[in-house]
Image: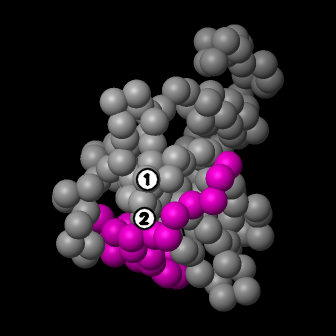
Amino acid sequence: MVCGTPTTIKGPLWKPDLSTAVWASGGRALPTVEEAQRAGMLDHYLSKREMAMDPKGYFKFKVDTEKKCLFASYHSCIMNDKGEFFDLEGNKLTCHGKSPEPVKTWECRTAKEMTTEILEDWDMAAKVLTIGHGGYIGREVQKAEDALYSGKTYRQD
């Protein structure tokens, strides 16, 4: 079972082997419809899991289709003993409220450029980022890049 859905495979008994699939797709091994649906369900399920906000800060990502760029901003915050988050001026942060001014911003053309600038070149990365945050940044900017170059709408998790 995947996400509560039985994984019964229906269809013809013959399935092309990997080399046939790669040849037929022009050199790319493309997922089947069932594989794409299962991956979509898993992604949806994992996007709904409970996540704790990083007490040091958070990232916002945007796509600018006119400039063909990805934008990222890092916003620092403070968590009190009740688990509430505040900006550096003491204003309470909410999910749908106005964000405080970012501590740092980036404008890049690709996900690889963005992750390199944030995770490798930013002098504060080791002080404010966790391993989980690094994984999240990688997933989000790859998703943003895909939206930028495919014409899809980007929505940050």
Q: Which residue is mark 1?
A: 90
Is 36 on the left or on the right of 107, as rendered? right
Q: Nearer the viewer, residue 142 or 105?
A: 105
Q: Residues within 10 Å of mark 1 (few under 14, many from 20)?
A: few
Q: Residues within 10 Å of mark 2 (few under 14, many from 20)?
A: some
Identified at 78% across, 19% down, the residue is 10
Spatial CA distance of label 1 from label 2 is: 17 Å
Q: Position of residue 60 (x, y in %)?
A: 53, 61
Q: Secondary structure at mark 1?
A: loop
Q: Amino acid at mark 1?
A: Gly
Q: Position of residue 55 (x, y in %)?
A: 35, 43
Query: Does 80 appear in magenta?
Result: no
* Magenta-highlighted residues: 96-119
**Image height of 63 relative to 152, above or below:** below
Q: Amino acid at mark 2?
A: Tyr
Query: Does 104 appear in magenta?
Result: yes
Identified at 25% across, 75% down, the residue is 121
Q: Which residue is mark 2?
A: 74
**Image height of 115 relative to 121, above or below:** above
Instruction: Mark 1 and mark 2 in contact? Answer it, CB < 8 Å.
Output: no
* The N terminus lies in quadrant: top right
In the rendered structure, which disc, 1 or 2, sits on the residue that comes first in sequence?
Answer: 2
Q: Secondary structure at mark 2?
A: strand
Q: Nearer the viewer, residue 45 or 32?
A: 45
Q: Nearer the viewer, residue 71 or 13?
A: 71
Identified at 20% across, 72% down, the residue is 123
Identified at 59% across, 45% down, the residue is 94
Which quadrant would residue 117 be assigned to in this image? Answer: bottom left
Q: Position of residue 98 (x, y in %)?
A: 63, 59
Q: Nearer the viewer, residue 74 or 157?
A: 74
Q: Nearer the viewer, mark 1 or mark 2?
A: 1
